[in-house]
Amino acid sequence: MSAAPIKVTVLGSGTSMGVPSLACNCPVCTSKDPHDNRLRPSLLLSRNGQNVVIDTTPDFRQQALRAGLDRLDAILLTHAHADHILGFDDIRPFNIRQKSSLPVYSTEETFRVLRRAFAYVFDDAPTLSTIPSVDLHVVNGPFELLGTPIIPVPLLHGDLEVLGFRFGRCHHRGVAFRPRRILARSRAGDRGRCGARQCVRHAQEVVEGGLTNPVTRGTDPVPAHPAPPPRTPWKDAFSLPGPVLALTSSRRFLHGDTQ
Ligand SMILES: [Zn+2]
Ligand SMILES: [Zn+2]
């Protein structure tokens, strides 16, 4: 099973408000380039007919429809900001179709917010409505999905500690993950047509949020995303060779500016 490559689909690469954002007349939000049109940030990992999503954004339903997602096997949550969890209720069709609950992996802090935001899912109150069915797994170290180790990588997102997820292997170490190409690459699943798709397919690490040292130091266009200090028990994950893919996005640079 583990021989097949993991297919990575960028379901969304926009800011928390999406791009274009509402009521904004900036050059990016009014751009005619379809690549300046981005849903909220999420990844789909697929292997051997199994699918894992990283984050359930407010656009999750639209993203799943666009990707033709007909099965879901697990959910990874980087953190509980609204743009990463508010599509959570839309996992219900997968519960119904698969006749099972879905495992969700994240931190206790993320689950604390999730339980509050979706209290009806967790309050055990009788209901005639359809509600998501999940099993929450607090991540304390590496775990396995899709036949491959998933290594949690704590990162700082503003003053919030969030989780990145490292997985897979890279056979193309020559892939250049230069910061100014990250934006172009991040749109691959949004309809990639440059070499970005290849880079995504062979990414060794995928770290959500544009948070990693190698990618963002001194170049991150999102001020809320400072490079993290080496403070984590899994910090060695950063020291391994190979490229890093960070999903980031901008309302500051046109797609064409990031080529
Ligand atoms: Zn704008
Ligand atoms: Zn956030």
Image: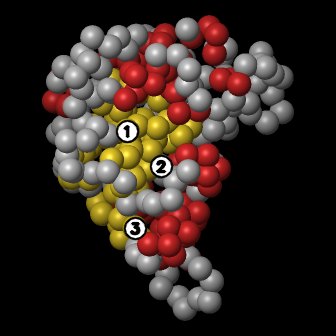
Please state which amino acid type lies under the numbered disc 2. Asp
Q: Quadrant of residue 166?
A: top left
Please state which amino acid type lies under the numbered disc 1. Lys
Q: Residues within 10 Å of mark 3 (few under 14, many from 20)?
A: many
Q: Which of marks 3 and 1 is in front?
A: 1
Q: State left or right for residue 73 relative to residue 21.
A: left
At 47% from the left edge and 20% from the top edge, which residue is drawn? 196
Q: State left or right for residue 207 relative to residue 12.
A: left
Taking 107 as reference, is 24 above or below it? Answer: above
The mark that comes first in sequence, 2 or 3, is 2
Q: Residues at badges 2 and 3 in contact (C-beta under 8 Å)? A: no
- For residue 102, which numbered disc appears in the image? 3
Q: Which residue does the numbered mark 1 point to in the structure image?
A: 7
Q: State left or right for residue 38 relative to residue 56.
A: right
One can see residue 140 in this view: yes
Element type where label 2 sits in the image: loop
Spatial CA span between label 2 and label 3: 13 Å
- For residue 55, which numbered disc appears in the image? 2
Element type where label 3 sits in the image: strand
Q: Nearer the viewer, mark 1 or mark 2?
A: 1
At 40% from the left edge and 73% from the top edge, which residue is drawn? 101
